[in-house]
Image: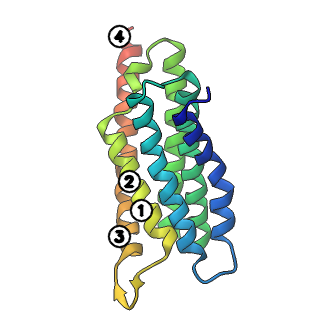
Amino acid sequence: MWTIPNIITIVRVLLIPVFVAVYFLDWKWAHQAGAFIFWFAAITDWFDGYLARKLNQTTAFGAFLDPVADKLIVAAALLLITESYDTVWITVPAILLMSREIYISALREWMGQQGKQDLVKVSFSGKAKTMAQMLALIGLLSEMEYFMGIRIYWVSLGYILLYFAAVLSFWSMLVYTKSAWDDQKNG
């Protein structure tokens, strides 16, 4: 259980309250610091999986905790931007993204109980959704359109990527559902 990848994943979970607390600090750069912590956590998500494979340290605990950690920090970020922006244009895709995560988790659990978890393993569309979602959240959390007087469009890009992630999210949900449906229909 105490492998390097698992420790990294545990650190990611422990970063969630730090991320939320920093984001709400009464400080000029609080949102940017929160976005940085989120970025760091997103990087550790990739890094722990890479190390688990590279060091041959994959564990059942890591396979369980890694997606839980991902969903927890993404849910926290979605709640923060929903509160910060207070607009339907953020709330609707945030609800879609969170709903999809709950649905897919339940679908994977159900298929896993039948020994058919490979039918709903992570696909390219799911990975693309995660990348777009992480980048969108970093941009939206930072609330930066300008840096040192130069327009950088992070918030604008964040909106675009959030909607792109929502579309990919819905698409990948359909792909996973079809795979499970076809199996149940034919099984």
Three-letter residue code for mark 1: Ala
Q: For the residues marked 3 and 1, what is the alpha-carbon distance in whole angstroms? A: 7 Å
Q: Quadrant of the C terminus?
A: top left
Q: Which mark is residue 136?
A: 1
Q: In x, y percent, where is residue 169?
A: 40, 46
Earlier along the polypeptide chain: callout 4 or callout 3? 3
Q: How is the image coloured?
A: rainbow
Three-letter residue code for mark 2: Ala
Three-letter residue code for mark 3: Leu
What residue appears at the point 47 percent right and 59 percent down from the top-left corner?
Answer: 39
Nearer to me, 38 or 136: 38
Earlier along the polypeptide chain: callout 3 or callout 2? 3
Mark 4 element type: helix
Mark 1 element type: helix
Q: For the residues marked 1 and 2, what is the alpha-carbon distance in whole angstroms? A: 8 Å
Please tell me in which quadrant of the rendered image residue 153 appears: bottom left
Mark 3 element type: helix
* Residue with the mark numbered 3: 157
Q: Are marks 1 and 2 in contact (CB under 8 Å)?
A: yes
Q: Is residue 120 left or right of residue 13?
A: left
Earlier along the polypeptide chain: callout 3 or callout 1? 1
Nearer to me, 77 or 107: 77
Q: For the residues marked 4 and 2, what is the alpha-carbon distance in whole angstroms? A: 31 Å
Please tell me in which quadrant of the rendered image residue 150 appears: bottom left
* Residue with the mark numbered 2: 165
Mark 3 closeness class: few <14, some 14–19, many ≥20 residues within 10 Å: some
